[in-house]
Amino acid sequence: MSAERDFDLIISGANIIDGSGRPGFAGDIGISGGKISAVGNLDRAEAGEFIDANGLTAIPGIIDCHAHSDLTLLADPRGQSKIQQGVTTELNGQCGLGVFPVRAEDREELRASVAFLAADVEWSWETAADYLETLDRARPAYSAGVMTGHGALRSYVMGFDDREPTDEELSRMCDELRRCLDAGAFGLSLGFEYAPGFYAKEREIVALLTVVAEREALVSVHTRTQRDEFADAVAEMAQWCRAAEDASGQGAVRLQIDHVKRSGERCWGTMGELLGLIESLRNDGLDVAFDVYPYIAGSKHLAGSLPAWVHAGGTSAMLERIARDDTRERLREELRQFEAGKREQNPFEISFDRVMITDVRSDANAPVIGRTLQEIADERNVNAVFFSMCEEDMQQALAHPLACVATDGLAFAPEGPAHLGNPHPRSYGTYPRLFGKYVRQEGLMPLEEAVRKCTAWPAARMGLSDRGRIARGMRADLVLFDHRRIIDTATWEEPHRFPRGIEFVLVGGKIAVEQGRQETERYGQALLAGV
């Protein structure tokens, strides 16, 4: 073979599943300059390095399109819980829980409002460009992009007040969103169940979505409810997207519905209704899809389950408010009304016996970790997992062709600065669980379709054209695993456990994980939209 046909690395004898959804095939992969140079029979080719796959399954690097590693990836750039399960690209800043833009004097207030993302890092940035530069300097183990969180954007202009913005404030919010997109943010994320996002009304959201439409960017939404009225919340969001597209007169919105679920026993068994609505919206011309994780419990900071009126004025005001007797009596009364059928929503989201504490912020409260709220009285400043879904609904969403599979989790580690509490096991096990439990063991879908949901499809949703498939010219982000052994091992009791069966992870053609051991060198970067 001539010199120009040589490769830096050849992966030989793999079962290649290319991400497109097509049937897998046996073959070799040649890599040069961080890109895939050839796919096929390379028996006679020469390379500087070889990996004998010996029948391992080769897939594109996994793209986690809904993640929350904004801060933990700075605290510990190894990103261990993600890269060890095959993630080579992730998109953070979701659910409206952004960490920029922020003024120096407002950092502590914003930090408190995004406690779910907690990590011990110095907030040295103010703008999107500052944050992305900070992330890039940290040299993460994999590529990490970011959305502009509506909560941070709103508080940057008008604080945590429960009111509508003035015309001047709304103009400033739109201008700041444009600056974030210009800096490389992939779009706008909305979180209507979190402060201050749940104070936003139609006028504000349509104005911001018009900016998104002008740029043909992505918008992701954690809707106003993920319980009985989820379908109504999705329809509302679709209406606002169409209004924004009309107002822009030139662009379109890519709408991603966050972690589709049927939360709360009252609406179990109705996933088909929600999926049918999303299909109908797409058939009517709206570019809409969704993400889902393969678990029946969600996770967030516990304060996020309190009603909107509790949060007015920011975290400090909330803490003062919930310490008062009149506040607690009002919450008790709302709960009594819910239990008597006189109120639609539980003020605490779900019953206390289905909420497990996963992390706290003080040593004094450490004994509550792993226990349910029914078992403990102290509910101050904790994260929790919410066992609010049923298996049948989750599987129906997981198998749907419009579903991306995402972790909705943070990058953690079994030790060091990213070893935080007892997190949701999805941060360690989402994709091995999909491939091992739901593909191999339960036969919910073909492996080729499962891989598409984790690679080519999220790449398309993010607007990425250089990754997500195994094909010539694509970035050489790759995962090699043993399809007979791959499985998650992280549990609710012991979540900081790596999966089994993943043998190699390559980032930009470099071996980042080999036979379950992560390399010291890191090959990722801050990923900018449109680059």
Image (tube, helix red, strand yellow):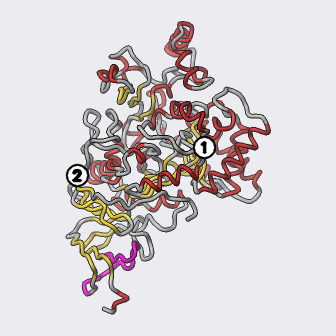
Q: Which residues are magenta?
A: 29-44
User: Is 389 above or below relative to 127?
Assistant: above
Q: Residue at x 49, y 42 (%)?
A: 260
The answer to whether residue 370 is magenta is no
Q: Quadrant of residue 104?
A: top right
Residue 119 badge: none
Which quarter of the image is occupied by the C terminus? bottom right
Single out the mark in the foreground, 2 or 1: 1
Seen at 37% across and 47% down, the residue is 76
Return the x and y of residue 334 as percentages of the image width and height. 55, 14
Which of marks 1 and 2 precedes in the sequence? 1
Residue type at numbered disc 2: Arg
Magenta-span inclusion, residue 35:
yes
Proximity of marks 2 and 1: CB atoms separated by less than 8 Å: no
- Residue 484 lies in what quarter of the image? bottom left
Q: Does residue 341 appear anywhere in the picture?
A: no
Q: Secondary structure at mark 2?
A: loop
Relative to residue 305, is residue 215 drawn left or right? right
Categorize mark 2 by other alpha carbons within 10 Å: few (<14), some (14-19), many (20+).
many
Magenta-highlighted stretch: main secondary structure?
Answer: strand
Q: Position of residue 314 (x, y in %)?
A: 59, 26
Name the residue carrying label 2.
500
**Compared to 302, does 72 lie above or below?**
below
Q: Amino acid at mark 1?
A: Pro
Residue identified by numbered label 1? 101
